[in-house]
Image (cartoon, helix red, strand yellow):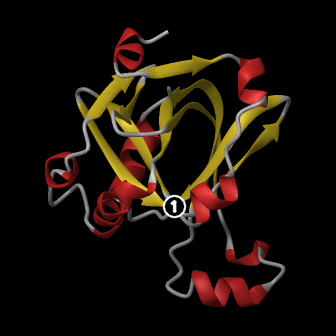
Amino acid sequence: MSDKMTELGFEKLSGEQLLTLDLNVFKKIGQEWMLVTAGDSRGWNTMTASWGFAGVMWGKNTFMTVIRPQRYTREFIDKSEYFSVCFFDEQYKKALAFCGGHSGRDCDKAKETGLVPVFTDGSTAFEQASAVFVCRKIYAQPMKKECFIDTSLDEQWCSAGDYHIEYIGEIVAAYVKK
């Protein structure tokens, strides 16, 4: 277990405990948003996301996120073995809005928002998070125009042709604030 996470008041969940985690992913992802972060103490970036999935794939507890090719975080997730997904209480919505509206190429998101990075389990999480999934990348694939069965979704969400890259990660560590 990461001693730093324990010091910050997080409890590491076992695989069995993860199965009983009371986390409404529809609300957390779609309404409250999350931060997807990759990198470590030598360099990292985070971005706000409101799209993603949690579930079981290939017999593993997994999380799937999608990132547009031009996002700075993509550079970090592509060169990292791990990424994290951090969920926050409602009081951090303004900080998440900032992280979604500004590029880490142009500013220090931690400094601007007051979010404190924590380097754990091969990735970067945040001290203020209420729940953290650290994921080991196991699959990545660009989404493609020709794969849309409902073409109205392509027209609505991908009209610029900047198709997301899908990343599936095995959840290798999960933490919740006590």
Residue 87 screen position, x and y as percent = 50, 46
Query: In the image, residue 173 lies at what x, y percent?
Result: 58, 23
Residue 26: % across, % down: 68, 59
Hey, which quadrant is residue 123 in on the image?
A: top left
Look at the picture and state if 135 lies above or below 92.
above
Q: Is residue 146 left or right of residue 160?
A: right
Foreground of the two, 34 or 83? 34
Q: Amino acid at mark 1?
A: Glu
Front-lying residue, 31 or 63? 31
Q: For mark 1, give the secondary structure.
A: loop
Q: Is residue 84 above or below residue 60?
A: below
Residue at 81% over, 83% down: 150
Residue 39 located left or right of residue 23? left
Residue 105 location, quadrant: bottom left
> For the image shown, how many numbered marks are present on the structure?
1
Q: Is residue 74 left or right of residue 101?
A: right
Q: Position of residue 138 (x, y in %)?
A: 66, 34
**Local crowd at mark 1 within 10 Å, few (<14), some, or many (≥20)?**
some
Which residue does the numbered mark 1 point to in the structure image?
Answer: 32
- Image position of 77 (left or right of 109): right
